[in-house]
Image (cartoon, rainbow, N blue to C red):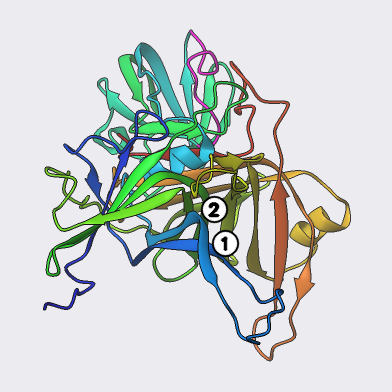
Amino acid sequence: MTIAQGTSKQTRVKRQSAKGSLAGTSGGQIMRREQSIFELVKDTYDTASEITSKQQLLSNRHGVKTVNGSLNGLLSPGTYADLLSAVLRRDFAAVTAITAASITIAGTGPYTVTRAAGSYLTDGIKIGMVVRLTAGSFNAANLNKNLLVTGVTALVLTVIVLNGSTLTAEGPIASATVSVPGKVTYVPETGHTDIYWTVEEWYPDASISERNLDVKFTQADLSLPGTGNATINFTAIGLDQTDDTTVYFTSPTAETSTDVLAAANGALYVGGTAQATITDLSISINGNGSPADGVVGTNLRPDVFRGKVMVNGSFTAYFEGGTIPDLFRDETETSIISALTAGTAAAADFVTFTLSELKLNTSTPDDAETGLKRTYSFVATYNAGGGAALANHATTIMVHDSQAA
């Protein structure tokens, strides 16, 4: 008898075509993880309330089932994009590159990238996206760099260079291309996806396959420390679990190999202003999932229900004065853009998170001997002022991932 080991275990996921049937055996994705647990739990019933002459418990039974799941990992581009899109209820989608543009670059940082005609807004560029100048007779210092969009109008992008290098003022440059690498998603206003997954936990050393059916990923919790790796922890709920001695997914896609993201590489903006004193940031995206009540005649619950998507979090910053505390004190709406890169290369892979409308709900000071800090909690809300051909999406949160498939 061989004891299963965590280094051998694989967690594999694949979308189902519908509720009630396992995903097909071909394909699937092996997930990188810090920890993955999918536990089958059952309601239990006994006869403790019944009084008999035997003065003993006569029965203990199993009832309806639920799978409680968690998948925790180090955040890296592309690795968790499919699961995150399921929590947000919209698949990642590409933004079409802008071609044949006449572009002028100006400024000393932030920079402006101005087009002679057309509209960045109608072309779908939003605050919090990353763009690159990928074609045109630009100075080499301007080509293929990650440019975080901090402001957008029809003709002008305001950008910063994510790796801290500089752009060279020049233009107009004809026949230029402005590309949006990777794909973007956000919580939509309509057309929400509702995805069920088959999750296999494969233990090759013990030849055991645990197959979790009708799983929904309902929450994603992000931790973005000022030093150290960014992490993402998913919560999942499923309806059933079976096991077998043979592997289920026969030809899964190998684990991704993108570098892990660190908040030390990238940029953080609060209220449109770059921040250099924030020591950590956490964001929770909660789809408020819950298993349905049990029904008569079966030990399977009928579904996993979802409530509204709610986004909240907190950040801690060194206390410098009234700018951020005043946002709380005056109940002023603000925004957060967090851009994380997988290294310092000009075109490094990245993930950005944009919360375009939020309020700070607490401003909690500490009292240490050294640098004083305050912790601010926030709740993000639906931005009714966003939409098509506007600077933000009409959403609570937008995610841009350079490796989203």
Considering the numbered disc 2 on the image, is that residue within a helix, a strand or a loop? strand
**Residue at horizontal 35%, vertical 28%?**
17
Q: Kindly report the distance in space between the C-alpha atoms of the residues bearing marks 2 and 1.
A: 10 Å
Label 1 environment density (alpha carbons within 10 Å; few <14, some 14–19, many ≥20): many
Q: Is residue 164 visible?
A: no
Which is more toward the observer, 138 or 387? 387
Q: Is residue 24 visible?
A: yes
Give the magenta range. 118-128
Q: Is residue 253 left or right of residue 104?
A: left
Which is more toward the observer, 186 or 12? 12
Dot 2 or dot 1: first in sequence order is: 2
Pointer 2 residue: 268
Query: Which amino acid, by three-letter code, is at mark 1?
Result: Leu
Nearer to us of marks 2 and 1 is 1
**Residue at horizontal 33%, vertical 67%?**
34
Q: Do the residues labelled 2 and 1 touch (CB within 8 Å)?
A: yes
Please, is residue 151 above or below residue 262 in the view? Answer: above
Extreme residue toward the bottom, this view: 369
Pointer 1 residue: 281
Q: Is residue 64 left or right of residue 11?
A: right
